[in-house]
C-alpha cells in the first residue's frame, strides 16, 4: 500500500473518515509514483473498484446507465484501494504502480482489460473486441469467476469504445 509523500499532513491512503478533513478534489502524491484524489463516496466501494469522480469531488459507482450517458464523458476515473462506506471521505488512486484493481474472469499479467458493468461493481476482465480500458496494465494474473483484486499499474485510465456501446 502506498504512503503519502506530499506535504499534506494527516492524509491517509489506507482508510476513510466520516468527517471531511480536506477540500474535495485535493490531490496528493504517494510512493510508487501514485497520485490520489480526495472524494466523498456517494455509494459503498469495495477494494479495487473503479469509481467515477465528478468535478465537485464526489465519487460514485460506475453503472451501465452512467457509462452510456453523455454526461459520463469527461468524468475522471479512480480506484478505491480499500473499502469505503457511503458518505465517507477518502483518497482514491488515480495512477501509479502496485494498485488494487477489481477483476473477474481470467486475466493474464500484461493482458489488456475491459470494463464489465455487472450491477455496480465495474470490475475489469480480459478485453473484448471493440471495448477496452486504456492506461491499465495488470501485473499479477487473476483467474476466477468471482470478483478478485489484482495488482496493476495505472496511468490515467480511460474507457475506449471502438464499436459502439457494449454494456
Image (cartoon, rainbow, N blue to C red):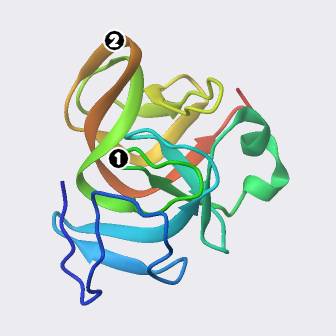
Q: State which quarter of the image contains the C terminus.
A: top right
What is the secondary structure assignment of the residue under circle 2?
A: strand
Circle 2 Cα neighbour tier, 10 Å, few/some/many (<14 / 14–19 / ≥20)? few
Disc with the residue nearer the chain's start (1 vs 2): 1
Q: Which residue was labeled with disc 2?
A: 144
Q: Residue 24, how many percent across, how many down?
A: 55, 77
Q: Nearer the viewer, residue 61 or 71?
A: 61
Determine the residue located farthest toward the front in the rendered image.
18
Q: Residue at 66% across / 73% down in the picture?
A: 55
Residue 110 as seen in the image, left or right of residue 119: left
Q: Is residue 11 above or below residue 122?
A: below
* Quadrant position of residue 36: bottom left
Position of the N terminus, as image quadrant, is: bottom left
In the image, residue 32 above or below residue 119: below
**Where residue 7 appears, x then y in whole percent?**
24, 90
Is 159 placed left or right of 66 in the picture? left
Give above or below for 19 relative to 99.
below
* Mark-to-mark CA distance, 1 and 2: 20 Å
Q: Which mark is residue 82?
A: 1
Residue found at x 70% / y 32%: 163
- Secondary structure of the residue carrying tag 1 is loop
**Can you tell which mark lies on residue 31?**
none
Of circles 1 and 2, the one toward us is: 1
x, y percent for residue 137: 31, 42
Amino acid at each position: 500500500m502506498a504512503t503519502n509523500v506530499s506535504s499534506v499532513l494527516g492524509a491517509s491512503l489506507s482508510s476513510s473518515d466520516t468527517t471531511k478533513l480536506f477540500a474535495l478534489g485535493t490531490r496528493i502524491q504517494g510512493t510508487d509514483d501514485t497520485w490520489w484524489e480526495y472524494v466523498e463516496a456517494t455509494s459503498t466501494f469495495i477494494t479495487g473498484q473503479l469509481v467515477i469522480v465528478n468535478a465537485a469531488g464526489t465519487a460514485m459507482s460506475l453503472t451501465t446507465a452512467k457509462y452510456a450517458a453523455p454526461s459520463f464523458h469527461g468524468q475522471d476515473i479512480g480506484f478505491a484501494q480499500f473499502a469505503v462506506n457511503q458518505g465517507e471521505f477518502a483518497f482514491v488512486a488515480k495512477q501509479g504502480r502496485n494498485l488494487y484493481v477489481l477483476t473477474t474472469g481470467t486475466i493474464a499479467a500484461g493482458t489488456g482489460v475491459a470494463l464489465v458493468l455487472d450491477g455496480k461493481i465495474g470490475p475489469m476482465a480480459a478485453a473484448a473486441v471493440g471495448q477496452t480500458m486504456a492506461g491499465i496494465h495488470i501485473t499479477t494474473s487473476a483467474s476466477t469467476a468471482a470478483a478478485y483484486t489484482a495488482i496493476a499499474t495505472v496511468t490515467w485510465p480511460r474507457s475506449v469504445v471502438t464499436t459502439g456501446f457494449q454494456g
